[in-house]
Amino acid sequence: MRPVSELLESRALTGTPREHDLASYPASAADTPPTRKRVLVLAYSQSGQLTAITESLIAPLRADARIEVHVETLKPQRAFPFPWSLWRFLDAFPESAHLVPAAIDTPRLAPDDAFDLVILPWQVWFLAPSQPVTAFLKHPLARQVLAGKPVVSVIACRNMWMMAFEKMKGLLTDSGARLIDNVVLTDRAPTLATLISTPMWMLTGRRDAVPGLPPAGVSADDIRRCSRFGRALRDALLDGRETGNAPLLSGLRAVEADPKLLASERAGTRSFLVWGHLLRAAGLPGCRRRIPLLILYLLFLILMILTVVPTSLTVQALLRRRMASRLAGHKAYFEQPSGSGSERLAQYD
Ligand SMILES: Cc1cc2nc3c(=O)[nH]c(=O)nc-3n(C[C@H](O)[C@H](O)[C@H](O)COP(=O)(O)O)c2cc1C
């Protein structure tokens, strides 16, 4: 296996355009004990960011001969481009927001494949789980494999993931899976900066496409430190704790929700649903009849980003005291199940 540092260098930090495969192979075959824990890892990444995060997280599992790691790479039947053209990027929003994803190849999993734990890394597209991951969760075979299984969700995105997480919870419930943990990694730059730097990264393939703004994406340090989750999962698997309902990643600062972004996320979700209906009525993805509506939508989106996000952040700053208890409630809700506590960091970081 290539070391994480090399992956970070060659994939995430350069932002070289490619879709990524994580090699699927078990840990060392020597001294294999008879009852190895089996872990299924889903993989899809355009820039390589989510690949690097996943590699860092699962490295401790792969290094342990008592654990077998199977990586299933999701392959859309028609690849999404990276970098995106502006037209393809906008055209992806109606189906992303409405959870009507483009099809993926049938996963190479047998219906009776039995896993002890499932690790589900996913990215947010238009305030919803990305299309390839949604397509996987809606695939009948995936549903058979996931039913009753404990799932660790790992989100990597710009910084708006809360409404997408609500949708993800619904998809996992539909699959009969048990969500036991959620890890969230975001771009730590100020929201208004990331609203420019992230789309520019998607459209150019370069994290540093906008001079004067911090490079887009999750930091190399945050990615490297994901190995703490792998170490905690390894110990939990070896203790058999994945069969219970308690989170395995509590006390590791797995997620820090920013409830101030919720108002913008809600407004965005509502507008994506309304515009998504209009666009889907105009035709299928790629259809020329969508173009005029998409141009209108782009103008609307820019207006919204320039007005709704700063207005809602300013109003909340002004009403900070009055809104404190409501925001604290939202924060606690969205940080479930793993939480933002740090009491086990010294043991695993
Ligand atoms: C079409 C599209 C829509 C996106 N929408 C969001 C979003 O709503 N919220 C967010 O925080 N990040 C959003 N992102 C950023 C992604 O969640 C993710 O961080 C980025 O695409 C890198 O993932 P990768 O590993 O697949 O390259 C979007 C990216 C794309 C390509």
Image (cartoon, rainbow, N blue to C red):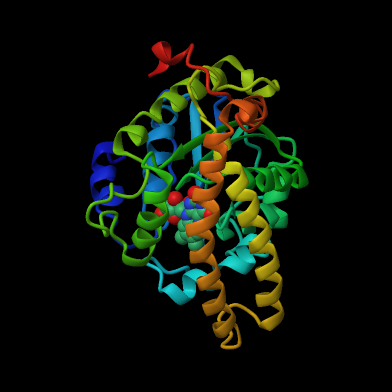
Residue furthest bottom in the image: 288
Q: Residue at x 39, y 11 (%)?
A: 346
Residue 24 at x, y percent in the picture: 44, 46
Q: Please give left or right for residue 51 compared with residue 183 in the image.
A: left
Q: Is residue 124 among the parts visible in the rendering? A: no
- Using residue 282 as the reference point, say whether residue 9 is left or right of it: left
Evaluate whether residue 17 shows in this view: yes
Q: Quadrant of residue 293?
A: bottom right
- Image location of residue 110, percent across then percent down: 65, 50
Quadrant the C terminus occupies: top left
Quick check: 113 left or right of 194?
A: right
- Residue at 31 percent of width and 49 percent of height: 12
Q: Count the numbered circles shown.
A: 0
Seen in the picture, residue 5 relative to 229 is either above or below; the reply is below
Q: Is residue 131 above or below residue 299?
A: above
Q: Nearer the viewer, residue 39 or 313?
A: 313
Task: Work out whether residue 148 or residue 51 is closer to the camera in this orientation and state it.
Answer: 51
- Residue sitting at x 58%, y 49%: 264
User: In the rendered image of this protein, does residue 1 appear above or below residue 294?
Assistant: above
Q: Residue at x 75, y 42 (%)?
A: 173
Residue 270 image point, x, y percent: 68, 58
The N terminus lies in quadrant: top left
Residue 143: image location, x then y, percent: 72, 49
Front in this rendered view, residue 58 or 292: 292
